[in-house]
Image (cartoon, rainbow, N blue to C red):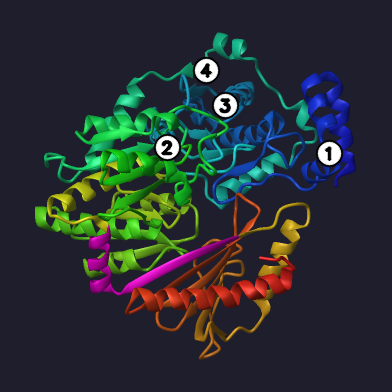
């Protein structure tokens, strides 16, 4: 624990009753965590438990981040900084206040803020940056994290989250701060009087909904499909609902979850990756005989789906939905005669190889990036002015971009594209599970699994670091009975061929990620989360059948997790 930092906060709290109250309410353990280390930018921006201290999310933490952003913008964009920053937020506790805190610091540096009149989605924030020709964007959100969390994501002028090269420059500016309590700010009244804050009109919403419908390939098809939608108390209401209704889909909403509730009281976790988030949607779906369930996370950048297979709802993984979308869209574009001659398909090093294999069968090359949609957005921009089209981009964690007018994950265009796809196949007498089986028959049975192991508390980061060092340095020649062919270390940017003993350079930014390529097109990845205290282990296998794939996944996971338990001392 940083005692000096704690004494500084305690001293400053004499002038802030709310801060003093919060500090005094901390238990010894809470204080230890809050004043050990500090919040940093990860794969999805900066997220943390709300509270007081450098390792907690608060107005003070945000002031520090916005000081760094303001200094970065003035240094790099100089006179262009007048274009301003778009700020949006989700419906979490403190999100609206945090958005105003961002504006108050930016305004002290003469930088205008564009705020929405209430909460808006992450994809609309990304779109809006380019729509109003702003120089940057801010989204206050903690995505699918539990209610005690909040967060902060920053976007460049292209509506893409800053990649490490630029984020590091912002962090360098933050490091120059001697005392976070001395960061300049303006009141909302001063911002208004000086013309440094503007509330965006509904014209932005209209433009966003209008461009979203362009992802539809068959807009005039008869809509026979019945949908159930839930925003899981997030800001997908009303945007996702409106997009579906305006484009003719029969959608019934889970009314209890249409309420913007920061406690997410009707769900165990507001995460569409978790089938438990669909409990109320499934109940409603059975009642009205819905064909498809759609759930978006609290900031509406990700979407999960449940497919009715004639008996019950089957919840597809992000990789399965991605493969279905690529398969449907490329076949449809070919049928309609609008298939691009040249193009690029984008995914990440932890994404299944199945969709990439489908894209390759249509002649499109694959670009793999690190985890984090900022890397896909960065690559998409490189296609501007070339003769290559943006084909599709996605992450395994339920995030997709069909068209890159948004340069972050976008559940609005995804819900439209998924609904159209499911409707098309329903008209052919098929559900998406049956179509997925067709894909497996054609391209091979790919199956994936992700294990997340939490290491909370002061010792958590150290434990994860030790685990990564073991797998980084140990000579591992087989996992689960499969030979290791290649080992790639994205931290050192070096790959190692086990059969030849030769090294090769990895042309991706540095990241604390390890990937083991196994025989038979299988692989394992270890990656500490950039936004939560957990180690994620990703597995993918390919076999002739589902049963063989499941057995192999169990074997791989069992061996890796047994080693993690042995090294860390956890019970499992």
Q: Nearer the viewer, residue 417 or 569?
A: 569
Residue annotated with mark 1: 27
- Give the foreground label among 3 and 4: 3
Who comes first in sequence, dot 2 or dot 3? 3
Residue sitting at x 48%, y 78%: 517
Task: Point out residue 135 in the picture as x, y percentages from the top left corner.
Answer: 48, 33
Q: Answer above or below: position of 119 versus 270.
A: above
Residue annotated with mark 3: 99
Which numbered disc covers residue 197? 4
Residue sitting at x 54%, y 43%: 268
Who comes first in sequence, dot 3 or dot 1? 1
Q: Look at the image and say whether residue 439 sits in the magenta stretch.
A: yes
Who comes first in sequence, dot 1 or dot 2? 1
The residue carrying pointer 3 sits among few (fewer than 14), some (14 to 19) or many (20 or more) residues within 10 Å by Cα, namely: many
Side of 310 where 24 appears, left or right? right
Which numbered disc covers residue 126? 2
Write the start and end of the magenta stretch as one range: 433-452
Find numbered disc 4 in the image and state the secondary structure of the residue it sits on.
Answer: strand
Who comes first in sequence, dot 1 or dot 4? 1
Find numbered disc 1 in the image and state the secondary structure of the residue it sits on.
Answer: loop
Residue sitting at x 75%, y 36%: 177
Residue sitting at x 76%, y 32%: 180
Find numbered disc 2 in the image and state the secondary structure of the residue it sits on.
Answer: helix
Side of 229 where 17 appears, left or right? right
Dots 1, 2 in contact, CB < 8 A: no
Task: Point out residue 493 in the picture as x, y percentages from the top left corner.
Answer: 57, 69
Distance from label 4 to label 2 (Cα)?
19 Å
The residue carrying pointer 2 sits among few (fewer than 14), some (14 to 19) or many (20 or more) residues within 10 Å by Cα, namely: many
Distance from label 2 to label 3 (Cα)?
16 Å
- Give the foreground label among 1 and 4: 1
Who comes first in sequence, dot 3 or dot 4? 3
Q: Answer above or below: position of 386 versus 122.
A: below
């Amino acid at each position: 624990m940083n005692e000096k930092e704690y004494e500084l906060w305690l001293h400053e709290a004499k002038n802030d009753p709310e801060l003093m109250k919060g500090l005094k309410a901390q238990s010894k353990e809470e204080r230890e965590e809050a004043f050990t280390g500090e919040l940093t930018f990860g794969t999805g921006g900066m997220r943390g438990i709300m509270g007081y201290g450098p390792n907690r999310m608060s107005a003070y933490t945000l002031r520090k981040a916005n000081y760094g952003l303001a200094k970065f913008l003035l240094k790099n964009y100089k006179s262009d900084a007048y274009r301003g920053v778009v700020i949006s937020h989700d419906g979490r506790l403190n999100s609206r206040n945090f958005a105003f805190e961002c504006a108050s610091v930016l305004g002290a540096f003469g930088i205008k803020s564009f705020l929405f009149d209430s909460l808006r989605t992450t994809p609309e924030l990304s779109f809006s940056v380019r729509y109003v020709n702003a120089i940057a964007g801010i989204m206050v959100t903690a995505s699918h994290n539990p209610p005690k969390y909040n967060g902060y994501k920053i976007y460049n002028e292209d509506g893409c989250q800053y990649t490490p090269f630029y984020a590091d420059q912002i962090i360098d500016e933050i490091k120059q701060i001697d005392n976070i309590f001395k960061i300049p700010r303006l009141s909302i009244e001063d911002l208004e009087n000086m013309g440094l804050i503007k509330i965006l009109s509904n014209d932005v919403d209209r433009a966003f909904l209008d461009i979203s419908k362009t992802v539809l390939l068959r807009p005039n098809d008869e809509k026979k499909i019945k949908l159930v939608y839930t925003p899981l108390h997030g800001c997908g209401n009303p945007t996702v609902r409106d997009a579906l209704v305006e484009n003719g889909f029969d959608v019934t909403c889970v009314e209890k979850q249409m309420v913007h509730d920061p406690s997410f009281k009707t769900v165990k976790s507001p995460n569409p990756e978790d089938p438990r988030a669909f409990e109320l949607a499934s109940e409603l779906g059975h009642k009205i005989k819905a064909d498809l369930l759609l759930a978006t996370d609290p900031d509406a950048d990700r979407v999960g789906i449940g497919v009715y297979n004639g008996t019950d709802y089957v919840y597809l993984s992000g990789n399965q939905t991605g493969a279905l979308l690529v398969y449907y869209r490329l076949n449809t574009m070919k049928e309609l005669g609008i298939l691009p001659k040249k193009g690029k398909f984008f995914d990440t090093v932890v994404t299944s190889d199945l969709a990439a294999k489908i894209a390759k069968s249509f002649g499109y090359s694959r670009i793999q990036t690190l985890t984090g949609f900022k890397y896909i957005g960065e690559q998409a921009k490189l296609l501007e002015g070339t003769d290559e089209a943006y084909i599709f981009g996605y992450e395994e964690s339920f995030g997709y971009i069909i068209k890159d007018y948004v340069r972050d994950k976008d559940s609005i265009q995804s819900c439209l594209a998924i609904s159209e796809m499911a409707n098309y196949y329903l008209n052919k007498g098929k559900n998406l599970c049956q179509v997925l089986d067709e894909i497996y028959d054609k391209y091979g049975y790919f199956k994936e699994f992700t294990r997340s192991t939490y290491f909370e508390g002061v010792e958590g980061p150290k434990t994860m670091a030790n685990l990564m060092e073991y797998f980084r340095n140990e000579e591992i020649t087989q996992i689960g009975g499969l030979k290791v062919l290649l080992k790639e270390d994205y931290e050192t940017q070096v790959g190692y061929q086990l059969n030849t003993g030769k090294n090769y350079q990895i042309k991706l930014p540095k990241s604390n990620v390890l990937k083991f390529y196994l025989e038979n097109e299988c692989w394992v990845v270890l990656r500490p989360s950039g936004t939560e205290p957990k180690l994620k282990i990703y597995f993918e296998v390919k076999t002739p059948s589902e049963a063989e794939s499941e057995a192999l996944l169990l074997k791989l996971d069992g061996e890796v997790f047994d080693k993690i338990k042995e090294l860390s001392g956890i019970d499992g």
